Amino acid sequence: MVSKVLLNKSPLELERLRAEMTLPDALQELSSLMVKEEKGGIPNDLQPLFLKTFGQPLLSFQKRSNSKKQCRLRVGVVLSGGQASGGHNVICSLFDGIKKFHPDSQLLGFLNGPSGMVENRYVELTEEHLAGFRNSGGFDLIGSGRTKIETAEQLAAVLKNAQKLALDGLVVIGGDDSNTNSAILAE
């Protein structure tokens, strides 16, 4: 049976959807990666801004000699900011990566940007959801937004929602304001 997503696609669009992304060698087999902690060289003038996260070790990934059985992951993803060219591929690659890590892993897409994290509006992303978005660029799949997470109430809501959803991680896709949101959420 042909997916509804593929019915009205041109031959060029179908070819684009079939194209496979190339991963660096280090990411080819996620189950063989291990995290290595290193002392960071972060400027001390940032310490007053990030009291809880300052001084945490930098993390890098190394290949493990023996594969270890991995547990399933629940990861949240949010598009943040204005339209950008790679959002869909980042989400599709994240989905593929966590499924490769463990086939029962789940990717939850927060709807319409950071406000979706605050209001706990999300959808579980599946292969069917992603089928028409692979290699299509854009920021349309789950919507984006420019909400800044700044207030104590917003931060508390995001934490509560992440805990309620039992997230193992959160990926924020965007630019400089999005990185600020990420740093504040990590703190």
Image (cartoon, rainbow, N blue to C red):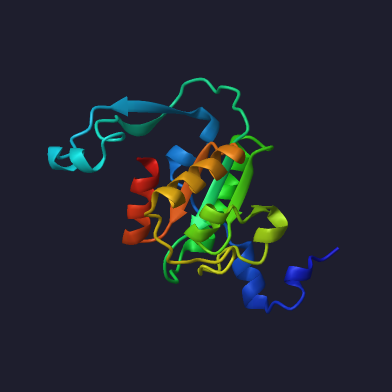
**x and y percent of residue 172 in the render?**
45, 53
**x and y percent of residue 83 in the render?**
45, 71
Q: Is residue 65 left or right of residue 4?
A: left
Q: Determine the residue positioned at 18% across, 42% down.
A: 46
In the image, 145 versus 84, the foreground residue is 145
**x and y percent of residue 183 in the render?**
34, 47
Q: Is residue 151 left or right of residue 71?
A: left
Q: Determine the residue positioned at 69% across, 37% down.
A: 104
Classify 159 as above or below 154: above
In the image, 96 versus 81, the foreground residue is 81
**x and y percent of residue 92 in the render?**
57, 55
Q: Determine the residue positioned at 79% across, 65% down.
A: 3
Does residue 90 appear in this view?
no
Classify 4 as above or below 186: below
> For residue 14, what is the image quadrant?
bottom right
Quadrant including the C terminus:
top left
Quadrant including the N terminus:
bottom right
Residue at the extreme front: 153
